[in-house]
Amino acid sequence: MTEDTEYVESIKADIRWLGFEWANEFYASDYFEKLYEFATTLIKNGLAYVDDSTAEEIAAGKGTPTEPGKNSPYRNRTVDENLQLFERMRKGEFKESEKTLRAKIDMASPNMHLRDPLMYRIKHAHHHRTGDNWCIYPMYDFAHGQSDSIENITHSICTLEFEVHKPLYNWFIEKLKIYPSRQFEFARRNISYTVMSKRKLLQLVNENIVDGWDDPRMPTISGVRRRGYTPESIRNFAEVAGISRRENVTDFNLLESCLREHLNKVAVRTMAVINPLKVVLLNYDESKTEILKAENNPEAVEKTYRDVAFSKEIFIEQDDFMEHAGEGFFRLTPGGMVRLKHAYIIKCENVVKHDDGTIKEIHCTYVAESKSGNDQSGLKVKSVIHWVNAATAVTAEVRLYDKLFTVEAPDAQDDDFKKFINPQSLQIFSNAKVEPDLLGHEKGERFQFLRLGYFVEDKYSTSAKRIYNRAVTLKDEWAKEQKKQKK
């Protein structure tokens, strides 16, 4: 069982889906045998026949929605003849398209799907599960209900386009007298700012617009798993969004809100600086390294803490310093003061620049009496910023993911949907600095980078090059919108 399969099972262990292009390797051969047995049973009961007609002749014989079809000239073959031909089809004695197996139902039915539908076709191709053991393959409409029945599926959940297939689904189960699985239909769950069409997703992959099917911006199980979504958050999203019989689009922010709600409870807190700016503390002893205590998760029932090193040189975010600050900027400025999370209040004394005028580093002083948890300085500051100790920081690559499209409904646009690709859907910071404590955690564990969002280590991350993907930001747009609506 692959990691992605395990992830699917953990999302919804009670629901299974099966198709022979993606069937579980352990079951594929057994299912082929069982379906072949079902088809043989229908032939013996006079409910299926081998047809020599071409695809064009079969299509022409189907008729139209307002006019009945015509019986195939091979419809009245004897049971013995059909059994022999079907066995020869299995043995590979015929060319592709030379023969098919069709159900014998009603060529005058108002439902086109009941006009002697195809059950099996010949295809001489290597199968990725069963190799070259088979050269006949069941059609979806035949395999669907029988696979559900074999698995004892009570509710087979499909999207609305399969509603017209339900009578055929029921017909096969009834005639075979097998476990009565039932098909239920609902509207497809569309999500804003993305596309759900497999054809369009394939375009994104083939044209290298995304990094494969598991790109964290893709609405695939492997994609959201790589991005850092948890099974619990997806279950919660499904419950909150509900189901409908009407086509609709669910706000992407709701999905993010469900993830944020779960990660807030389980994610380990840490500090990371994605766009570092060096700060030198002029009045801190150069030979001293202080160990501070930081809480891992304030939401956890059992409180745990980690050690955070603090010394003369640290990194802060470039966005947390502004040399010429406007009104409303409360972070670090020349002559201004801020508190470092878990540490001290610092004051900017001067700015050191490169020859080209860009900032090299900033020089500050720290207030020794302002240590977090034991502040006796009496000073009040308006902002708290995160930081990383320069001497112990680990260099990593941090990837910030955003919505893949710039419009809510890219499918609904008259223009090519690819014109609305968001150029800022991925930002990469290759010189980020993170706490060394991150190295002691397992891959797949989720983290909250303070003030930046929730992250997970990427599958391509190595000990030589750590890579972290942002799953979601801290800001909850969905909750904000809900509050607006209540007001």
Image (cartoon, rainbow, N blue to C red):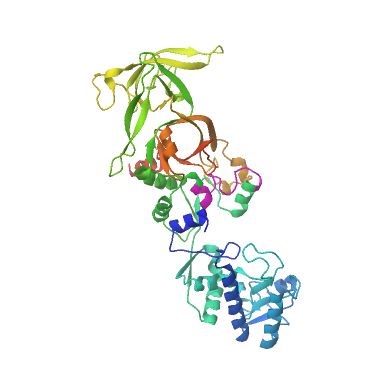
Extreme residue in the front direction: 287
Which one is in front, 181 or 62? 181
Image x and y of residue 452, in percent: 43, 34
What x and y, as percent, mark residue 408? 52, 44
Q: Is residue 85 above or below residue 155?
A: below
Q: Which residues are magenta?
A: 206-225
Which residue appears at 62% of the width and 46% of the height? 204
Q: Nearer the viewer, residue 399 or 133?
A: 133
Q: Is residue 300 left or right of residue 420?
A: left
Please name the residue shown 62% across and 53% down the image.
Answer: 199
Res 475 quadrant in image? top left
Magenta span dominant secondary structure: loop
Residue 146 location, quadrant: bottom right
> Which image quadrant: the C terminus?
top left
Residue at 55 percent of width and 70 percent of height: 144
- On screen, residue 120 versus residue 255, left or right, reads right
Number of numbered discs visible in the structure rendering: 0
Residue 400 appearing in the image? no
Q: Is residue 209 magenta?
A: yes
- The structure residue drawn at horizontal position 70% and vertical position 65%, both measured from the top left corner, is 125
Q: Position of residue 196 (x, y in %)?
A: 55, 52
432 horizontally vs 116: left or right: left
Q: Is residue 258 magenta?
A: no
Residue 209 place in picture, x, y as percent = 62, 42
Note whether residue 101 is visible.
yes
Q: Is residue 37 left or right of residue 99?
A: left
